[in-house]
Each structure stands twice: as structure tokens, then as C-alpha cells.
Image: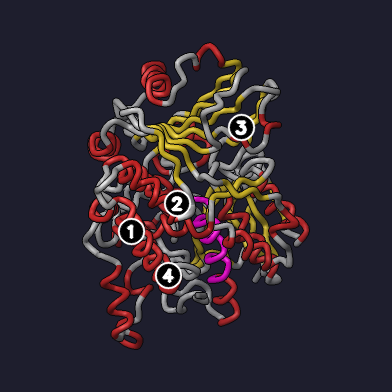
Amino acid sequence: MTDRIAVIGGGLGGLAAAVVLAARGHKVTLLEKNAWVGGKAAVLEEGGFRFDMGPTILTVPRVLRRILEEAGCDLDQELDMVRLEPQWRCFFDDGTVLDLSENVGTMAAELDKLAPGRGAGEGYRRFQAMSERLHGISERFFFWKSVEDLGDTLNFRNSFNASTLSDVLALRMGSTVAGTIRSHVPDARAAQMLDHFTQYVGSSPYGSPAVLCAIAHMQTNDGVWYPMGGTRAVPTALERVARRLGVEIRTSTGVRRLQVERGRVVAVETDGGERIPVSAAVSNMDSVRTYQELIGGPPAKRFAKRRSYEPACSGVVFYLGLDRAYDHLLHHDFVFSRDPEEEFDWIYRQGEPAPDPTCYIAAPARTEPGVAPAGGEALYVLVHTPYLRERHDWNRMLPAYRRVVFDKLKRTAGMPDLEDRIRVEHVLTPQDINDRYNVLNGAIYGLASHGRFMGAFKPGNRSRDVEGLYLAGGAAHPGPGMPMVLMSGWIAADSLDQDMRDGVHGDAGAGSARAVA
């Protein structure tokens, strides 16, 4: 029997898993179908402009710090990180401009100015206090261990006491993010700004469970950060550390299937037909596609039967190199839709692009001037769209939707001459995202977090269907977003390592990974 472990997919979750496993003494081979590692955290360069192609917002950097510490590395030595304040600038359809501050007191005062006499500031303080409570519960019961359902979070027989009951009630199960926000913050503009924390997980605040309000405290407490060199610097650092630890990294090497014998992973077969014997595998590929395409048979049927999963939203991303900067933009900006209920209804219920969408803009030249020629701008513009349906032909749909997006930026974000300034333009559509990253139906954020009770739960990192199979990435617990995807890699690696030390290989009864406060 081999002692080699395969990591399938070199996205952030796969890289994190490889680093942790190698740091704990395992022999690791990472297989990546693209010519680069980092997955969506890729880079595009043209004409003196440099664009991060995927994630652009880094929060909760202590997750990355912990992964690097496993390898004896210091985050501050590996990356030059800049804390951004204000965190975002918000543009609303009525002409209001509002900056999101990490300081709760400062933000509360700004909301009182925005909506005088309505208690918006005090409501925001109460919302943040609730968010902090939810964050603490998540740290105790949800993070840093393999979780697939409520039974994995709470041991009702052994540890259910008054304190645990209080925590369960605090989860506000049955309530949505949107409803919870509006019960605290009466101003529609402030509520729309807070709604968009759920866009880190590609889901509608009207369909997501209230526990996701914890994201607000994670961001205000831990800050929003920019690694110099762009978010691409994160996978670059992880790759560098992985190689130092002896991880074999093979790019341009896709995986055709996982060979399973007597219910256990025994080998990986590459697209080229090579068979690589393994003792276990971590799949950083989309979890649903892992079962459907790499495993199949009874395990895939059991996985599908246990719970149906819906893809999260997709998006259209424009990479715009401008010859002149827009000085009124911050590093991160949201240009909000006129009506959030209408917008989310189009995207998540009707399954069609919203006629008046919210646009996210990253303008990193504020923090790192070298991303563009002198005086220029390297804009990243993301608009969320539905995940791919058979009726969607983005080659046909893109020209009209480009006009919708650009008209929104001109009208609401103060960019009337946008097209006159463009010198470089590229775009990714949902179809491009689907084909490039092996995600489910072009979903950027893995699986949707919809459902008032079970919406926060994703497939667990320790497979219940195949021994020796572990899952990482945005379509596995704890979900999408840079810190959560990195954490998923740590959990998958920790679960695998613990199972091997305990003499089991991903058995459903093997117990959970080490939980950490």
C-alpha cells in the first residue's frame, strides 16, 4: 500500500490542504488541470495593466496565518498585507454615497447622519453585537472541523445544556439574513449594504439563514486586506511553501476518475491514462462534480440522495484597463441596484440576469499603483448572474448585458465617459467560468446557502460515502470566500491526518477532526 496522498485541483483549498498535509509529514502529489495553480485566483496582464481574475477581497487573514504556521512560516514574512479602511464605498441609485467603516462606532454615527431620528446607528450596534455572538458560535461549533449537518455541530446527548440551548436559540433558525438585518437597521440603503455580505457566498439574503449574519462581524473585527501583488500573491505564497515542503505539483494534468475498490480510494487516473496509487485523496474539485464525474456508481447515488444541492450564482466579470483613473472610487466599491428584492428575484428565482444589477468594482491602483500605467486604472467589475441553464447562450446574451452593466456604472457610479477611457477590455461569462474552473453550472461560489434551517451546511470535508476521500473548496464545508475555502483545505487535511493516525480512512464513524476554539 502506498503512502502517497493525491490532491485533485490546485485552487486555494487544494493548496492549503497540500501545505498542511506535507507539513505533517505526508507525501503529497497535487494534480491541476490548468497550467497554473490557484484556481480562480489567477492573473491577467496586458498593455501594462494587471488584473486579479477571481477573488479580490481578503478577509479573516488569521486562517491563512494558521495554515502557514503549520509549515513553520510567518504570514508577515510571506506576504506584504495592507489593511483597507474604509472597507467599501457604496453608490446607491438615489445618489447617496456611503462608506463602510470597520469601526462600529464610526459606522453607527454615519448611519445616524444617513437616516436621522430613525435609530439606525443604535440598530447597527445591536446588529453587530448579534453578529459577534453568531461568529463566536460558529467558531465553537462550525469552523475548523468536518461538518455536514446539525448532528456534526452539536452532540445533543453529551453536551446539550443550558449554554448550548442559548447558543441554538441565538442562531435564529427559521429567520433569513434579509429579515434579520431589517429588524435591526430600518434604513433601506444601509440594509442593502449589509445584505451584500451574503454575496461572499453567492446567495440571496432573502433565502439564506440568519447565521450568515456572522460574516459582518468577521469583516469588521478582522478587517479587509489587500496583499501587495494582488490576491494572486496568496496562491503564489502557498505554492512556494508547498514546494519547500516537498509537495509534487503537476500542472496541465487533469484527473479522469478516482478508482474506488471495496468502498475505498486506491488510485487516481489522469486524463492521460496514468494510474497513480494513493492511500487517500483530497478533491478540491466541485464536490457534486467529484461524485458525478470522478466516482459515479452507488457512492454518487448515495451522495445525491442524502440532500439535493443548488449551485450558487455565477457572474460576468469585466477587466477594464483605463487610461485615466476615477478618483472618486475606493479600492472596493459597490454600485447597488435600485431594488434588492427585484434583483435577487431575477437572479435566484427567475434564473435570469437582473435588469438593474448591483455591480462590484475593484480599483486596486488606489493601493498598488503598479497595476496600471501611470494615471491609469485596472478595474475589475463583477455582476452576479444566475448559474448556467440550458437556455443561456452567453455568446448571444453578452453584448446586450454589457450595455446594461455599463449604463448602470455611468448612471449610478459617476462614470459617464467610461467607454472613452477603456484601452484594454476582457470578459469572463458564466460559460467561461464553467469551462475554465470545472465548477457546477458556472457557479462562482460553489453551492448556494439557501434554506432557513440547513442553508449554511455544505458537504462535509470527510466523505460519508467513500473511505479515503476528503473534500475541499467552495462546494464543501464551510463554503465559499477566500478564508472559508482556505479553511476547507485545512479541515480536509486535518481530518485525513487524524484518520490515518487513528488507523481509519475516512470512515463515517471515524469521529470529527480536531475542533479548535
Q: Nearer the viewer, mark 3 or mark 1?
A: 1
Checking the image for residue 106, the label placed there is 2
Inter-mark Cα distance, 2 to 1:
14 Å
Badge 1 element = helix
- Give residue 136's mark: 4
Tell me what residue is drawn at x 58 percent, y 44 percent.
39
Q: Earlier in the sequence, mark 3 or mark 2?
A: 3
- The CA distance from mark 3 to mark 2 is 32 Å
Instruction: Please indicate, yes or no, whether residue 17 appears anywhere in the rendered image.
Output: yes
Q: Are marks 4 and 2 in contact (CB under 8 Å)?
A: no
Can you identify the residue that label 3 sits on? Answer: 51
Cα separation, mark 3 vs mark 4, equals 35 Å
* Residue occupying image coordinates x 59% and y 76%: 500
Horizontal and vertical percent position of residue 146 = 46, 69
Taking the image as shown, residue 179 lies to the left or right of residue 114, namely left
Count every numbered label the image shows and give the total.
Answer: 4
Mark closer to the observer (2, 1):
2
Q: Earlier in the sequence, mark 2 or mark 1?
A: 2
Q: Earlier in the sequence, mark 3 or mark 4?
A: 3
Which residue is labeled 1 in the image?
A: 127
Name the dominant secondary structure of the magenta segment.
helix
What amino acid is labelled 4 in the image? Gly
Which region is colored magenta?
480-495
Q: Residue 255 appears at what percent x and percent y?
A: 57, 48
